[in-house]
Image (tube, grey):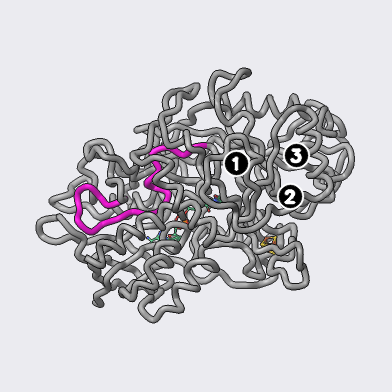
Amino acid sequence: MSEFDVIVIGSGAGGGTLAHKLASSGKTILLLERGDFLTREPENWAAEDVFVDGRYQSEDTWYDGGDKPFPPQVHYFVGGATKLFGAALYRLRADDFGEIQHEDGVSPAWPISYDEMEPYYTQAEELYQVHGARGEDPTEPPASAPYPFPAVSHEPRIQQLSDDLAAAGYQPFHAPCGVMLDESNMPYSHCVRCNDCDGFPCLVHAKSDAEVIAVRPALEHDNVTLVTNATAVKLETNDEGTAVSGVVVERDGSRETHTAGIVAVSCGAANSAKLLLASATDEHPNGLANGSDQVGRNYMFHNSQAVLALSKEPNPTVFQKTLGLNDFYFAGEEFDHPLGNIQMVGKSQAPMFRGEKPLMTKPAPQWTLDRIAEHAVDFWLSTEDLPRQENRVTLTDDGAIRLTYTYSNEKPKQELYDKLKSMLGELGMHDGHLLHHNAYLKNEIPVAGVAHQAGTCRFGSDPSASVLDVNCKAHELDNLYVVDTSFFPSIGAVNPALTAMANALRVGDHLLDRLAA
Ligand SMILES: Cc1cc2nc3c(=O)[nH]c(=O)nc-3n(C[C@H](O)[C@H](O)[C@H](O)COP(=O)(O)OP(=O)(O)OC[C@H]3O[C@@H](n4cnc5c(N)ncnc54)[C@H](O)[C@@H]3O)c2cc1C
Ligand code: SF4
């Protein structure tokens, strides 16, 4: 048993960033991480090992609403999911913080405004070394500073795509990106601009992930302790049930308990809900901090599609994730409801297709997988999914995660796909042919693609309808915080990591005030 000022559970985008923020305070901080450091090895950059064999995917089994088991796309390492992420670091749009009418219902307002989050987005962009270009994306929210680094340039085929989109009247932009690339001085650039980035670990530690950017620098402070292979299994409370009194951890087959004045849970949306639900007491019979019955509910993960178009000319792009398109993000003249975001994903490689259903290509049915990969231009389409009470994490009798989920906004998802498909002829692609592929989602069970999981402990001002207050402190406990993507009341249609990072910095400011007092 040891006593700390703060325990942070989980070292990913939320927890790692919070630990970094608190590190220089001199307060004693214990960072608990169920995984280990991700080994740097040649397999980091081997498509077959990463995408087909799932080398870095957890061995967890979760269950869907019908109790069918599936292997979730989760990654337990120092740095969490950011070790594998595509480093597309988007701000939510300012309007995402308000109520938005969607095809299937309302995306609710956040309890804080975009203006309150803005300074922390700027800090998060600085910390995570985001590259981008302001003023290109028509939906871009106001920013108090330029991007700290220039946009990553398009390679010729993507520049052509950008030019073709612009010529057709669309407004493509350089995607915000967290890679430590110095194009003006490549011999000294950490990032070598390779084709194994999105969905891969970075062998040379040049991706702005939470391990490299947040956890390692935090550990340079003597007051910060990281314990790896340490899974938090239960939170204990005082007799009154008003504060967390101990964090029970399983490590090397035995259990130990750590204590701290403040406990911040950041295990990822599903695992944070699991930890709270598994910590029921007499005072909290439905799970810790769950008097509102909201813990685990409102699970979201984007209604996403990974698709590829076939370029008439080969697409030799190496680093493809440089372009975005938000022309259909909000309702407009053509659609009276939002459709979502279009962006590029990492360039597909033939080994990624192994194990997929045969990719039948109408323009060229005889094409080999190698040839398809050579011509593929790969897109990621994200439509916002709505928070629904019935979309939730519960626990099975054995304490495993059960994820019950029904899709929302299926029509706008289809419309976004159809819209892109209708544009292909203008973009130098084989007209009207857009292939779905699962390389990025990794397997055939859609609910297993939990990369963008969010929303199981939403924050709000009404304790009967939310788990956390505006500072992400549990309404019902004095010292319990949740700082991963669980706090999202809605998810928008852009990638979630920068918002988790910015929010961790915001909560960190609150905790520094509290610790000073
Ligand atoms: C392949 C892939 C690509 C992605 N691409 C992008 C992208 O381009 N842009 C973007 O914005 N987002 C992207 N994401 C999503 C992004 O990585 C997540 O939104 C973000 O990491 C979530 O942060 P988090 O703190 O909520 O959880 P995580 O970063 O997952 O951190 C949770 C941490 O908690 C640990 N943990 C879990 N349970 C316990 C426990 N009981 N005890 C101790 N530790 C525990 C985990 O090991 C993990 O380290 C991607 C994700 C994946 C998988
Ligand atoms: S593109 Fe750069 S950041 Fe990404 S994996 Fe390659 S070297 Fe690392």
Relative side of 100 to 351, left or right: left
Q: Which residue is mark 2?
A: 320
Task: Determine whether the residue tagged by mark 3 lies in a helix, strand or loop.
Answer: loop
Task: Determine whether the residue tagged by mark 2 lies in a helix, strand or loop.
Answer: loop
Foreground residue among 275 and 25: 25
Q: Main secondary structure of the magenta part?
A: loop
Q: At which x and y percent is residue 172?
A: 70, 37
Disc 3 to disc 1, how far (Cα)? 13 Å
Up-down relation of residue 218 to residue 107 (above or below): below
Q: Please provide the residue range marked out in magenta.
A: 472-492
Q: At which x and y percent is residue 235?
A: 25, 60
User: Which residue type does callout 2 highlight?
Assistant: Gln
Residue sitting at x 48%, y 33%:
385
The disc, 3 or 1, on the residue closer to the chain's N-terminal end is 3
User: Which residue type does callout 3 highlight?
Assistant: Pro
The disc, 2 or 3, on the residue closer to the chain's N-terminal end is 2
Task: Determine whether the residue tagged by mark 1 lies in a helix, strand or loop.
Answer: loop
Q: Which residue is mark 3?
A: 358
CB-based contact (under 8 Å), mark 2 and mark 3? no
Q: Is residue 67 visible?
A: no
User: Which residue type does callout 1 highlight?
Assistant: Glu
Up-down relation of residue 500 to residue 512 (above or below): above
Which one is closest to the eye, mark 1 or mark 2?
Answer: 2
